[in-house]
Image (cartoon, rainbow, N blue to C red):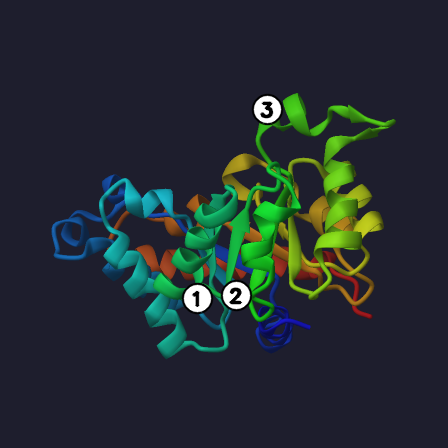
């Protein structure tokens, strides 16, 4: 079992939570007093993290939301802050990298050494060798895109491959080939509950990162019932905008806590308890 998988399991139990807060900053939506400060993204993230750390199983900063503001330094500070202040909560860098050879090695260094992430999202469509630079770091989590939450997912992920949709082939490869070090996870959107159930049947107890609840309209109860493992875990259910911008006033942090607690309660009402 990888260090990330173990940390995730501990967080599921400690905080009785499958909730992941996506740290996707949009300065235009920050309270005015905060947007005008130095390092506003870090200050916003810090407040949200301090308000929610006892309610979550992970945090997930999305790389583009930092790079667009030339705020990579604030991404580094955010991850460092979680590790120093709440070391029991793992951090997923959502960068969806996908490349080959030496470039993939550099992206792995970026995720795990520069930013210090505990796990990273990756695109598998260049094949297994493009994943190996991440997978060989057996203490880290490698979260592979499988069935994404967007409406256009069907354009490619449902393509027929020897009688099966492509996303099921990806799930099988992850379970049978790529997970030899026990550090693979898959991304499967809450917006596709039937497909979520199918992926769960293929991969057994492999953890699944499930975006698409909240602003994207995924049904929480369906996602939990279709995707949970026998012990009521196995899921990292991610919400970003619905938590971060529950209020755009000075009470944004307490509103984020209330939204996180509400989501955790909604999830837990649907969980099996093995």
Question: SS for tag 1?
Answer: helix
The residue at the far front in this view is 102
Q: Position of residue 170 (x, y in %)?
A: 72, 41
Q: Residue at x 52, y 43 (%)?
A: 100
The residue at the far right in this view is 163
Cβ–Cβ under 8 Å for marks 3 and 2: no
Using a 10 Å C-alpha cutoff, classify the residue at mark 1 as few (fewer than 14 neighbours), some (14 to 19) or many (20 or more). many
Q: Residue at x 59, y 78 (%)?
A: 14
Q: CA distance from mark 1 to mark 2?
A: 7 Å
Q: Is residue 105 shown above or below 217?
A: below
Q: Residue at x 71, y 58 (%)?
A: 179
Q: Residue at x 41, y 53 (%)?
A: 106
Q: Position of residue 45 (x, y in %)?
A: 32, 59
Give residue 52's mark. Answer: 1
Q: Position of residue 74 (x, y in %)?
A: 26, 58
**Is 53 in front, or is 105?**
105
Cβ–Cβ under 8 Å for marks 1 and 2: yes
Residue at the spot of label 3: 152
Closest to the camera, between mark 3 and mark 2, is: 3
Give residue 56's mark. Answer: 2
Q: Is residue 83 shown above or below 42?
A: below
The reply to whether residue 251 is visible in this rendering is: no
Cβ–Cβ under 8 Å for marks 1 and 3: no
Closest to the camera, between mark 1 and mark 3, is: 3
Q: CA distance from mark 3 to mark 2?
A: 29 Å
């Amino acid at each position: 079992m990888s260090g990330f998988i173990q940390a995730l399991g501990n967080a599921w139990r400690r905080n009785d939570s499958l909730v992941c807060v996506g740290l996707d900053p949009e300065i235009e939506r920050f309270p005015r007093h905060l947007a005008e400060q130095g390092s506003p993204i870090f200050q916003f993230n810090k407040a949200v993290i301090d308000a929610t750390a006892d309610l979550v199983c992970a945090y997930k900063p999305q790389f583009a939301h930092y790079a667009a503001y030339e705020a990579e330094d604030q991404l580094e500070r955010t991850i460092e802050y979680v590790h120093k202040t709440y070391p029991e909560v793992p951090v997923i860098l959502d960068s969806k990298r996908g490349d080959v050879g030496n470039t993939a090695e550099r992206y792995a260094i970026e995720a795990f050494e520069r930013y210090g992430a505990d796990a990273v999202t990756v695109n598998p469509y260049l094949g297994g060798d493009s994943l190996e630079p991440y997978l060989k770091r057996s203490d880290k989590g490698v979260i592979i895109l499988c069935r994404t939450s967007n409406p256009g997912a069907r354009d490619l992920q449902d393509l027929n491959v020897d009688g099966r949709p492509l996303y099921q082939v990806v799930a099988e490869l992850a379970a049978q080939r790529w997970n030899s070090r026990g550090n693979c996870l898959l991304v499967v959107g809450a917006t596709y509950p039937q497909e979520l159930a199918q992926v769960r049947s293929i991969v057994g107890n492999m953890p699944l990162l499930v975006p698409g609840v909240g602003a994207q309209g995924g049904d929480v109860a369906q996602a939990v019932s279709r995707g949970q493992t026998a012990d009521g875990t196995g899921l990292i259910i991610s919400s970003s905008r619905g938590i971060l911008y529950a209020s755009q006033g000075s009470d944004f942090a307490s509103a984020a806590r209330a939204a996180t607690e509400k989501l955790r309660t909604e999830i837990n009402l649907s969980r099996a308890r093995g």
